[in-house]
Image (spheres, helix red, strand yellow):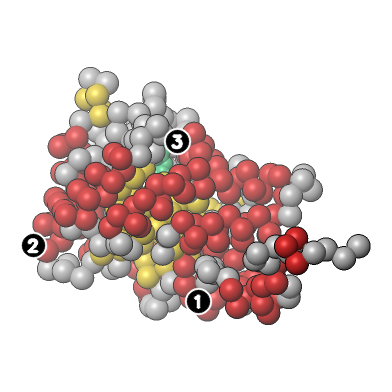
Amino acid sequence: MTPTVAAFPAARFRRARKSPALRALVRENSLGVDDLIWPVFVRDGEGIEEPVPSMPGVMRRSVDRIAQAAVEAQALGIPAICLFPYTDAALKTEDCAEAWSPDNLSNRAIRAIKAAAPDIAVMTDVALDPYNINGHDGYVVDGEIVNDETVEALVKMTLAQAEAGADIIGPSDMMDGRIGAMRQALEAAGHRNVLILSYAAKYASAFYGPFRDAVGASGALTGDKKTYQMDPGNSDEALRLIQRDLSEGADMVMIKPGLAYLDICHRVKQSFGAPTYAYQVSGEYAMIKAAAQNGWIDGDKVMLESLLAFKRAGCDGILTYFAPDVARILQG
Ligand code: PBG
């Protein structure tokens, strides 16, 4: 059967898919170790690596082990590590004072990492939930999560983290006005070069479930976070939040969760051209792990494909619990 000339396809896209070399040549986006921020969980004690059941492969580490993990991450070329404390229930109070204690878990971990792995950037989380008796990111007064009083506490927390040596402050609380307040306080205290990566578009999401187990906040949380985190139906609001946070002094912005919000990542990058990050959150991680453990998907391939999707959407980087696994694969 000889087709007539008119039957030939006008363009043969398959030509450039013929070999790995040609596919590499025409690939528009790629994932690199430079794109990774590794979130880790810190707990008390020494020499401890305790698995988080709902996040297979993820550990809560004592400060000494966190420092060791940071050394390994630095050797793998991962540019940044992000700390989340698993705080002892006895230290959770109504006033959340542990949040700005210079010797809280997170601040001790910052100092330990700076001493052991000085070249990796240290990012922190700013929100009251690990220290709050009711599991909320802000103070609760008569059932309301109060904004301005919370911002004052977040500023104290920020200054303690900067004092301990944090490179990047990551407010995940979604209170209004916190970026401006934190930026002013940092400037006034002489921390002019501390970056703020604002969790600017953070949705009230069911994908955070395993994280709340990991930091021991799931049992504590009363109600939900819908009065401060975004409604999943909204998109324009994300742009307004990003604009607001950039104008208040954020250096970088984040969209969270990740894969279900790629449209937001794309709009944000297109609109502002600012350093834009996505958080591939605990629930996304757990879903990939669970399906892989059942043999239903190829875990490594899905991991890499999902992370590449963030790059294609326009993100400059991704917070992902997979960071060391990805780095090892990318380094061959
Ligand atoms: C809380 C915070 C959360 C996450 C990061 N910081 C949970 C929440 O808002 O309830 C979630 C991260 C994840 O799910 O991996 N300030």
Q: Which residue is mark 1?
A: 77
In the displayed structure image, the side of residue 257 where residue 189 appears, left or right: left
Instruction: Name which quarter of the figure residue 159 lies in.
Output: bottom left
Question: Reading the chain from its start, which is encountered first: label 3 or label 1?
Answer: 1
Residue drawn at x 14%, y 50% is 181
Looking at the rendering, the quadrant in which ligand 1 lies is top left
Task: Name the amino acid, label 1.
Answer: Gly
Badge count: 3
Residue type, mark 3 in image? Ser
* Side of 256 relative to 194 (left or right): right
Whole-percent x, y for residue 320 in the image: 51, 57
Dot 3: within a 10 Å radius of its alpha carbon, few (fewer than 14), some, or many (20 or more) residues? some
Residue closest to the eye, 290 or 109:
290
Residue farthest left in this picture: 188
Task: Write down the residue under mark 2.
Answer: 188
Can you say whether 136 is above or below 214 in the image? above
Q: Looking at the image, is mark 3 or mark 1 nearer the viewer?
A: 3
Residue beneath disc 3: 205
Residue 107 visible in the displayed image? no
Q: Nearer the viewer, residue 123 or 332?
A: 332
Sequence order check: which comes first, mark 1 or mark 2? Answer: 1
Q: Is residue 279 above or below residue 130?
A: below
